[in-house]
């Protein structure tokens, strides 16, 4: 009896830790990216930051795989050879999400450079719509009527948020353009182009939805740990990241150096971006859809409040209404009517319910 109580307490503790971790990761990353791209001083090249995040993720996952193999160097090397080299077909399948994630992360930096943190945080929730869309098309899943309603609310909320920000676009764009004209180097803050930021966010949402569902499709039935799979991803992402660096910023890298504009805060951002996804991969198994909804909603609220004080963000009634619609859609999308109608008390099966399997992962 005592053991069962301890297990229950530990499970609840892990749920609250998951809530805190997911909330902070969702909120802090967006705020940090926005601050890093708009603060005074030399601006780092975002393509190099994406590449360094992949290196950090690779090193972290290699250490975790080494630990999984009992800290035995020979077993570790054999495991890498068996999974990556001796199984080229499986490795090549990972090429698609590897390329997609590199492009997606670069688009997120573009979006964070041109959208305030609150608008960026709300708009990026459109990945729920794209994930659902690809789940229906690729995995042939069906959605509940409540989920379709949630997607409509989501789109309406994001439209309201974007419309709420259109009043100051012309003024801010012209002012930023003047600054960019007088200081045409990378040290100048990028001209604020809200439309560019919006399209970058939409592109990132589209790629996020596709990569997530494609990754889920190729993972079905595969007996590979999440850390080994991330080693595969990072190994294949690094070449794509290098190509992106020299295609987009080759001349600036040669003229000013690969690490131009880097300081302690940029390295913190690199590690945050690298570790964020890995942290979520660990804690998300302890968090149900309602808990994930709380985490995302709290992150939006934190981003809005922080933006008011850090970035002088003007919180309007229209923006607030749009954000509330987005938050409501998150909870509605995670609502499972089958589980609410029937609460089993004796079922102890290890697998997810049929209703849970219908829910696209976001």
Image: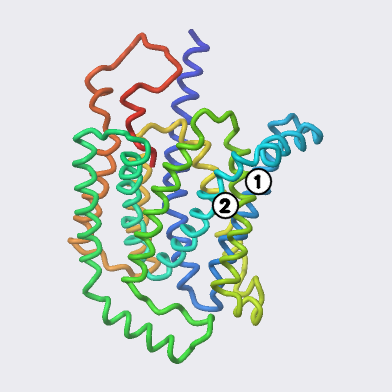
For label 1, count other residues whose C-alpha is less than 10 Å away and answer few (under 14), some (14-19) or many (20+). some
Answer left or right for 345 relative to 252.
left
Can you name the residue that lies furthest to the right here? 74
Q: Residue at x 18, y 41 (%)?
A: 149
From this view, report whether residue 5 is shown above or below residue 190. Answer: above
Nearer the observer, 126 or 219: 219
Q: Position of residue 326 (x, y in %)?
A: 25, 49
Whichever of callouts 1 and 2 sits on the residue coming sooner in the sequence is 1
Nearer the observer, 262 or 100: 100
Q: Which mark is residue 29?
A: none
User: In the rendered view of the protein, which quadrant contains the C terminus?
Assistant: top left
From this view, report whether residue 189 is shown above or below residue 202. Answer: below
Q: Position of residue 117 (x, y in %)?
A: 38, 62
Q: Residue at x 51, y 49 (%)?
A: 97
Can you name the residue that lies furthest to the bottom here? 182
**Residue at the disc numbered 2:** 274
Answer left or right for 338 relative to 256.
left
Q: Position of residue 180 (x, y in %)?
A: 43, 86
Does dot 1 land on a helix, a strand or a loop?
helix
Q: Which mark is residue 60?
A: 1
C-alpha gap between disc 1 and disc 2: 9 Å
Is residue 61 among the parts visible in the rendering? yes
For label 2, count other residues whose C-alpha is less than 10 Å away and answer few (under 14), some (14-19) or many (20+). many
Does dot 2 land on a helix, a strand or a loop?
helix
Whether the residues at callouts 1 and 2 have beta carbons within 8 Å, the answer is yes
Q: How is the image coloured?
A: rainbow
Q: Residue at x 35, y 37 (%)?
A: 360
Q: Position of residue 333 (x, y in %)?
A: 27, 39
């Amino acid at each position: 009896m005592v053991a069962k109580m301890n297990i229950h307490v530990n499970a609840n503790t892990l749920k609250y830790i998951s809530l805190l971790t997911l909330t902070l990761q969702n909120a802090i990353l967006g705020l940090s990216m926005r601050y890093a791209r708009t603060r005074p001083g030399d601006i780092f090249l975002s393509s190099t930051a994406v590449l360094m995040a992949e290196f950090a993720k690779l090193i972290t996952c290699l250490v975790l795989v080494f630990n999984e193999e009992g800290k035995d160097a020979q077993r570790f090397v054999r495991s890498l050879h068996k999974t990556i080299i001796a199984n080229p077909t499986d490795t090549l399948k990972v090429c698609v999400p590897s390329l997609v994630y590199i492009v997606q992360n670069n688009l997120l930096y573009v979006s964070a450079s041109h959208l305030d943190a609150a608008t960026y945080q709300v708009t990026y929730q459109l990945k729920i719509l794209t994930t659902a869309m690809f789940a229906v098309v690729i995995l042939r899943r069906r959605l509940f009527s409540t989920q379709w309603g949630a997607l409509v609310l989501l789109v309406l909320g994001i439209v309201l948020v974007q419309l709420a920000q259109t009043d100051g676009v012309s003024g801010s764009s012209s002012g930023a353009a003047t600054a960019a004209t007088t200081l045409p180097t990378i040290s100048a803050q990028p001209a604020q182009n809200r439309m560019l930021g919006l399209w970058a966010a939409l592109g990132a949402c589209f790629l996020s939805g596709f990569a997530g569902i494609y990754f889920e499709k190729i993972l079905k039935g595969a007996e590979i740990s999440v850390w080994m799979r991330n080693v595969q991803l990072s190994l294949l992402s690094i070449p794509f990241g290098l190509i992106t660096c020299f295609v987009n910023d080759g001349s600036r890298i040669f003229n000013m150096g690969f690490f131009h504009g880097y300081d302690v805060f940029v390295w913190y951002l690199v590690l945050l971006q690298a570790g964020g996804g890995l942290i979520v991969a660990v804690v998300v198994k302890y968090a149900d859809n309602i808990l994930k909804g709380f985490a995302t909603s709290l992150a939006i609220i934190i981003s809005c409040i922080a933006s008011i004080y850090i970035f002088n963000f003007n919180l309007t009634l229209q923006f607030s209404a749009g954000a509330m619609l987005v938050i409501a859609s998150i909870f509605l999308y995670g609502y499972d009517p089958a589980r609410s109608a029937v609460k089993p008390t004796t079922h102890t099966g290890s697998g997810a319910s049929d209703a849970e399997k219908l829910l696209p992962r976001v």
